Image (spheres, rainbow, N blue to C red):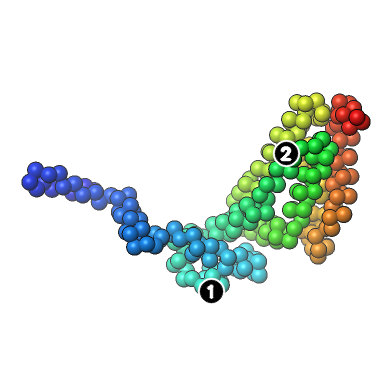
């Protein structure tokens, strides 16, 4: 709402809209030398670190906002300034971990070398990250929460596995364009490659059949065998001639 006043011929317009009030609060916070409510990165990180410990110890369903407030050392009101719900807080943690762990993963596809060497390099990098303790714990938690909050699992898949799948499918399409691979469905082949690169490793880690991640030697053996099978199926005569040189 606008309130109008005229004094000495001047337009004394005062903007009382919510947007203007928000701008004023933001400006006041800056003048006092402190972040506006919900904009302090240190406080946000403090909440995330506390919540991460709670989710790891208790799981998503058992954890409560009260547990998180105690662990993070903040009030419940402060948490809700930064995160609207426990689900939103959990998603923020997952996104942060994904950024840390999977950063530059797909750079393995751009490291040079022949197609076989590139696939082995990428397969090892992928298997190493997918079977590490942090990722296994996160996937268990998401799986447990997805039955009650299906959208959580869907967003986790879209932002992580599905995004990576599209990138790798594009890589396979480029190899097809160069005449190195011959496949009718590169999207399906990308899924097949992922399974081959982690054959016998991922599910054993996920279900705690093994308590330690696979060794580098075991990982290389599994990935190399998977790449051999993949290229035996989809590799072209042009690729075989290049590898024979």
Q: Residue at x 56, y 63 (%)?
A: 48
Q: Which of the pair 31/11 is nearer the observer?
A: 31
Asked whether residue 153 is in view, the answer is no
The residue mark sitting in front, 1 or 2, is: 2
Q: How far separated are the C-alphas under marks 1 and 2? A: 45 Å
Q: Is residue 156 above or below residue 82?
A: above
At a point 70% along the width and 60% down the height, the residue shown is 134
Picture layout, residue 240 above or below residue 126: above
In this picture, residue 10 sits left or right of residue 150: left
Per the image, the residue denoted by label 2 is 110
Residue at horizontal 83 percent and vertical 40 percent from the top:
117
Q: Residue furthest right?
A: 244
The disc, 1 or 2, on the residue closer to the chain's N-terminal end is: 1
Q: Can the viewer see residue 198 in this picture?
A: yes
Instruction: Please tell me which residue lies in front, 184 or 105.
Output: 105
Q: Quadrant of residue 144?
A: bottom right
Q: Quadrant of the C terminus?
A: top right
Picture disc at residue 70? 1
User: What is the quadrant of residue 206 in the picture?
Assistant: bottom right
Q: Is residue 22 left or right of residue 78?
A: left
Q: Position of residue 121 (x, y in %)?
A: 79, 44
Image location (x, y in percent) of residue 102: 68, 50
Expressed as whole percent of the image width and height from the top left, the position of residue 242 reads 87, 29
Residue furthest to the left:
8
Compared to 231, does 158 lie above or below? below
Question: Badge 1: few (under 14), some or many (20 or more) residues near its Cα, within 10 Å?
Answer: some
- Mark sitting on residue 149: none
Label 1: state its secondary structure. Answer: helix
């Amino acid at each position: 709402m606008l309130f109008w006043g005229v004094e000495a011929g001047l337009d004394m317009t005062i903007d009382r809209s919510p947007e203007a009030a928000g701008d004023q609060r933001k400006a006041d916070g800056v003048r006092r030398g402190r972040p506006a409510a919900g904009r302090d990165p240190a406080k946000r990180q403090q909440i995330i670190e506390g919540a991460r410990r709670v989710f790891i110890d208790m799981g998503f369903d058992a954890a409560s906002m009260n547990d998180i407030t105690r662990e993070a050392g903040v009030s419940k009101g402060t948490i809700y300034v930064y995160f609207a719900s426990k689900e939103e807080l959990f998603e923020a943690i997952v996104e942060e971990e994904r950024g840390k762990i999977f950063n530059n993963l797909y750079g393995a596809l751009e490291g040079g070398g022949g197609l076989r060497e590139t696939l082995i390099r990428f397969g090892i990098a992928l298997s190493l990250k997918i079977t590490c303790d942090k990722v296994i714990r996160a996937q268990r938690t998401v799986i447990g929460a997805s039955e009650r909050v299906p959208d959580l699992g869907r967003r986790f898949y879209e932002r992580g596995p599905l995004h990576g799948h599209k990138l790798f499918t594009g890589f396979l399409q480029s190899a097809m364009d160069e005449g190195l691979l011959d496949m009718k469905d590169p999207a399906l082949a990308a899924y097949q490659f992922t399974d081959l690169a982690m054959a016998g490793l991922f599910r054993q880690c996920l279900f705690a059949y093994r308590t330690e991640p696979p060794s580098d030697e075991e990982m290389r053996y599994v990935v190399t065998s998977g790449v051999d099978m993949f290229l035996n199926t989809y590799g072209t005569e042009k690729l075989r001639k290049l590898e024979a040189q």
